[in-house]
Amino acid sequence: MAKIGFVGLGNMGLPMALNLVKAGHQVIGNDVMPKGMEALKAAGGSATNDVAQIAGCDVVITMLPSGQQVRDVYLGATGLLAKAKQGTLFIDSSTIDVETARLIAAKAEESGMSLLDAPVSGGVGGAQAGTLTFMVGGRDEAFEEAKPILELMGKTIVHAGGAGAGQAAKICNNMILGISMIAVSEAFVLAEKLGLDKQKLFDISSKSSGQCWSMTTYCPVPGPVPTSPANRDYAAGFTAAMMLKDLKLSQEAAKLAGAKTPLGAEATALYARYVDSGQAGRDFSGIIQFLRK
Ligand code: NAD
């Protein structure tokens, strides 16, 4: 049984922490809001506002909104790294920029600690079911140490490479997703204008070269895939705001790395307009409604 600190008990972090409690670990949670801490305590974990107590754990997992909060929590005189003991293993599962991921990994290493970037895909449902995919960046030894813990929260654990590689994998994947959702949505909008039945387009494309996850699992029109958000008026799922966040991260990374991603840039601009039209909290597949206008 390990002593695990868990910072960021929100939509994703809380169910992940609860799976660690269920597996018999001693979990000490922290959040700036009381709700997640109360829920963790009710389920058999504990909670504290004392950073030193979290930093004193064998393993510390963070699940925070963005790079800014991750820097606040890890760095500076009152941050986790300043308070931790040598040998502590840190795992940051937030989706953040590659630069911040590499910066905190380097700072941890300077102080004799290991830090992995380990963003996830699979959403709140995957966090609850313990079926997340973890994309992990960092040293081999740290990955081997983290794997049994990540396996309690996820089904697929992939070591993507050195520090920052997990974040790189996450933003590349989500750039594909953002672009492919727009591509599939545009095809359905065109089919409507051409008088082609949506079910016929699905039956053909889902078995042809247009086949992709945005078509077969998350189809943006109601009917062909009964579990897709289109069937419940685009209730999220994965919100448009989160897709925009990940697309922006992909564009920042592309700029810094000197990669040309014109479709990624266009997808970012379209999602920004969709979010600005008051749809931040709607599922990202709802962009089809925006494209119809
Ligand atoms: P969330 O906003 O529900 O949770 C974040 C939590 O962090 C909140 O409870 C917040 O109070 C807490 N927090 C913020 N600053 C803090 C600080 N300084 N100290 C302690 N706690 C602090 O967000 P979420 O949906 O749980 O997402 C977390 C991360 O996971 C994000 O980076 C997101 O991009 C990523 N992600 C989310 C999903 C999803 O479907 N929700 C899927 C994959 C990845």
Image (tube, grey):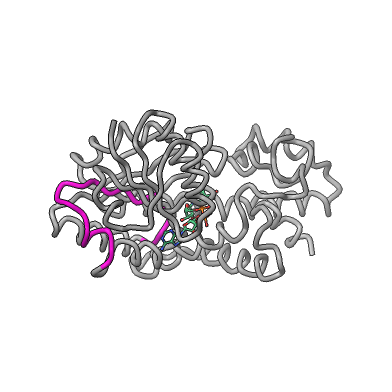
Residue 150 occupies quadrant: top left
Relative to 176, is 74 above or below? below
Q: In percent of the image, x 21 and y 47: which residue is there?
A: 88
Q: Is residue 125 left or right of residue 286?
A: left
Instruction: Give the quadrant of the C terminus.
Output: bottom right
Q: Is residue 118 left or right of residue 36?
A: left
Identify the magenta region. Answer: 78-97
Relative to 150, is 74 above or below? below
Instruction: Give the quadrant of the N terminus.
Output: top left
Relative to 135, is 147 above or below? above
Q: Nearer the viewer, residue 39 or 93?
A: 39
Q: In percent of the image, x 35 and y 33: which residue is there?
A: 25
Relative to 68, is 183 above or below? above
Q: In percent of the image, x 59 and y 50: which residue is there?
A: 180
Residue 234 drawn in magenta: no
Q: What is the x, y in percent for residue 3?
A: 29, 39
Residue 73 occupies quadrant: bottom left
Q: What is the x, y in percent for residue 108?
A: 20, 57
Q: Which of 224 and 286 is in front in this view?
A: 286
Q: What is the x, y in percent for residue 129?
A: 52, 32
Q: Nearer the viewer, residue 246 or 189?
A: 246
Q: In percent of the image, x 26 and y 69: which residue is there?
A: 76
Q: What is the x, y in percent for residue 145?
A: 23, 36
Q: Which residue lies furthest to the right in this view?
A: 195
